[in-house]
Image (cartoon, rainbow, N blue to C red):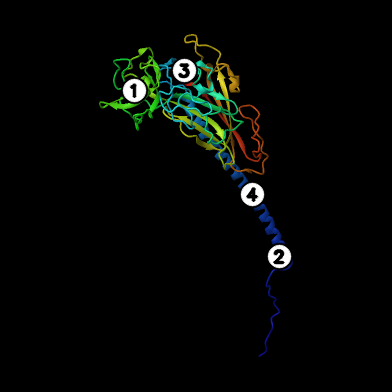
Amino acid sequence: MSRQISNRSFQNGLSLIELLVALALGLAVLIGLSSVYVAAKQSFRFQETTGRLQEDAAFAIDSVARDLRMAGSAGCMGINKVTSPSIIYYPGSVLLSGSPGSPGITTSPDSTSGFYGANPLGQIETTTLEVVQQPFTAFNFVRGFDTGIPTGMVATTNPIPSTISDSLYFAGASSNAVAVGAPMTGSTDRLTLAADTYGWGNGVTAGNSRVYTFIVSNCTSSSIFNGKVTVVGGITGIDHSTAMGNGSDSFTSSTLFGTDAIVLPAEWSFYYIATRTGASTPSLYRVFFDGNKRFNTEELVSNVEAMKLNYGENTNNDVVTGAPTLVPDIWRTSAGAVNDWSRVVAVRIGLMMISSEDNANPGITLNVPTLLGQSYTKPTGASANRLRKEFSTTVVLRNRVAAR
């Protein structure tokens, strides 16, 4: 039996030319896919950064605007109707040493020691009588400052304020109100409270550690005064005597407040821009006074590079009240340009938000935007490669334009 050898040939692989062609085709596909991936990743990164800017900006704008809408509130009456029994001391904890520590010490704090209590403007503008006398008048419940903040508004231990950003101070009655529990029968009677709902009397000692600046208001009159909540004979009330730092034991015009009145602490807020140690971008900060003490500076929102403020001033008078009307007829682009703060009826807030990443989108040329219609210059040393976007809102000071 003889063996037959087949003449069929078997293919065991690719030729070199076929392999090179396959590699070239595969490389072309990979290059195309890589380009699509890079473009998609850059687009996602840009959208994510933009979204984060919008979220941060919304929170920052809402924080300032929500507080600012309450500026100048004084219960039922308008801000122009608030009177004061000659307050000689404004209570409050201090962040720096050297300020008076209790009612009865009536000397003004050293201007280099920081501001305290409910009337920091009284130390900023010592030549303006209405500012020194009381914290809530038509002149001083809202005040802006250009490119930097007044010395002493923030403790030296806090982040150094930005030198290119505006800052904003405003004051008003708290939304935490308690009804008067019983009518006053005499002008020096303690002001009875229905309840100490918010714990104003907590921690009261023999000293005056819990003295608040309060506003008491009905729809006929409003007074601002210093008082301490205590319980005497089982009845919760407020001592508003001269021992609390008031110039008189009675309210202005010896007003007797009844159960139609409410009591509210006086509050103020101060917003500014600063960069904390170790941070690569600035943040929005707030200093808050709750009627009793000034709290430590609080960082609210990061990646806020600058704040710009415009002020809507009204030069027209209401034919009945003589007060400014609702709509501003002149927009001041700086605090220094405001002629009369008692006629500022609106504030426009502009925030320059900045991305946390230094190279947010290398495929796009980033242009520095304007801020409230004015040219914007980034801070010295700040990266030009970060994404920047302007956000703004306008707040009408409703307690100035409401019933007076």
Q: Earlier in the sequence, mark 3 or mark 1?
A: 3
Residue at mark 1: 239
Inter-mark Cα distance, 3 to 2: 92 Å
Rendered image quadrant of residue 330: top right
Q: Nearer the viewer, mark 2 or mark 1?
A: 1
Q: Is residue 232 left or right of residue 93?
A: left
Q: Nearer the viewer, mark 1 or mark 4?
A: 1
Residue at mark 2: 19
Residue at mark 3: 133
Rendered location of residue 391, percent (x, y): 57, 32
Inter-mark Cα distance, 4 to 3: 64 Å
Inter-mark Cα distance, 2 to 1: 96 Å
Position of residue 276 relative to residue 141, above or below, is below
Q: Earlier in the sequence, mark 1 or mark 4?
A: 4
Q: Is residue 93 left or right of residue 343?
A: left
Position of residue 286 relative to residue 361, above or below, is above
Q: Amino acid at mark 2?
A: Leu
Inter-mark Cα distance, 4 to 2: 28 Å
Tag 2 and tag 1, C-beta contact below 8 Å: no
Single out the residue that lies furthest toward the left: 233
Inter-mark Cα distance, 3 to 1: 21 Å
Q: Earlier in the sequence, mark 4 or mark 3?
A: 4
Mark 2, residues whose alpha carbon is within 10 Å: few (<14), some, or many (≥20)? few
